[in-house]
């Protein structure tokens, strides 16, 4: 895995992320329309109730008109509720695809980082081979590093342990990845993919949803 290949895959990840955001925006817009329709319906009914309370009269034509408007609003509300269901499923599928892409990218990134780290270690050891050998020799001959005979530690192992301890003290373990290698996505912050069991159970649910449910209601 090269950095170039990783960047190509991440570009696709970014495009999918934009697709998710677009669906989220569409879902929010649809929710606003749905709420506005519900508010308008409530207001219309309340106006008619207030009028009836004031006049105590309601003609046949007024009632027919009211019923038609009520049916119209309810039909639109049913439509946008169905659209909401369709968009929610569409959003889940888009997020699930993004999640799977990120998991694959994490594996590819891990391979790249492992290769890079080992290449850098090889360069470090090759460039500093003489100095490292000299450091080891000095420590081994200093007789200041005592092996732990209780665990059967040799002098060589004791020196290596000491060297590891020195590296551990001096290496910055809080270093962050370059921005180009990060894979965080706000749209996946609260996403929980369905388990295989959930998907299996849902496959048996034959109840129509979304637009399919609308047409069933017309029958």
Image (spheres, rainbow, N blue to C red):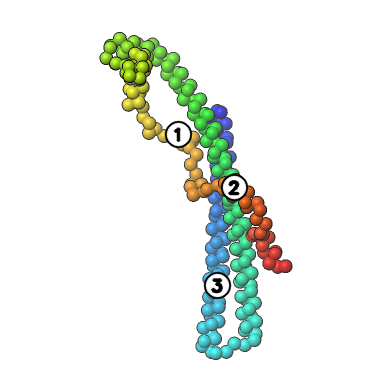
List the residue tagged with mark 1.
178
Secondary structure of the residue carrying tag 1 is loop
List the residue tagged with mark 2.
197
Whole-percent x and y of residue 122? Answer: 46, 18
Secondary structure of the residue carrying tag 3 is helix
Q: Residue 121's mark?
A: none
Whole-percent x and y of residue 92? Answer: 58, 50
* Residue in the picture at 66% in, 62% down: 213
List the residue tagged with mark 3.
40
* Residue in the picture at 66% in, 59% down: 207
Whole-percent x and y of residue 171? Answer: 36, 27
Mark 2 or 1, closer to the camera: 2
Mark 3 and mark 1: Cα distance apart in space? 51 Å
Whether residues under marks 2 and 1 lie with C-beta atoms below 8 angstroms apart, the answer is: no
Of marks 3 and 2, which one's residue comes earlier in the chain? 3
Q: Is residue 79 visible?
A: yes
Whole-percent x and y of residue 215? Answer: 70, 64
Of marks 2 and 1, which one's residue comes earlier in the chain? 1
Q: Is residue 16 visible?
A: no
Q: Is residue 177 above or below residue 38?
A: above
Q: Is residue 215 above or below residue 176?
A: below
Mark 3 and mark 2: Cα distance apart in space? 42 Å
Question: Going by the image, does 30 lie left or right of 189?
Answer: right
Q: Nearer the viewer, residue 108 or 61?
A: 108
């Amino acid at each position: 895995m090269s950095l170039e290949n990783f960047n190509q895959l991440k570009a696709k990840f970014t495009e999918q992320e934009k697709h998710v955001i677009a669906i989220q925006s569409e879902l929010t817009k649809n929710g606003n329309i749905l709420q506005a329709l519900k508010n308008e319906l409530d207001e219309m009914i309340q106006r008619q109730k207030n009028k009836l309370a004031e006049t105590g009269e309601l003609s046949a034509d007024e009632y027919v008109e009211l019923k038609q408007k009520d049916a119209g609003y309810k039909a639109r509300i049913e439509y946008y509720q169905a659209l909401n269901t369709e968009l929610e499923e569409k959003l889940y599928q888009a997020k699930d695809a993004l999640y799977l892409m990120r998991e694959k990218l994490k594996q590819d990134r891990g391979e790249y980082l492992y290769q890079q780290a080992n290449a850098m270690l090889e360069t470090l050891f090759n460039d500093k081979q003489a100095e490292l050998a000299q450091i080891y020799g000095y420590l081994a001959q200093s007789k200041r590093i005592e092996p732990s005979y209780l665990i059967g530690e040799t002098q060589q192992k004791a020196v290596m342990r000491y060297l590891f301890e020195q590296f551990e003290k001096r290496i910055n373990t809080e270093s962050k990845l370059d921005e180009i290698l990060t894979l965080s996505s706000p749209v996946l912050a609260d996403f929980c993919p369905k388990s295989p069991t959930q998907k299996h159970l849902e496959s048996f649910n034959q109840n129509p949803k979304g637009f399919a449910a609308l047409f069933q209601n017309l029958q």
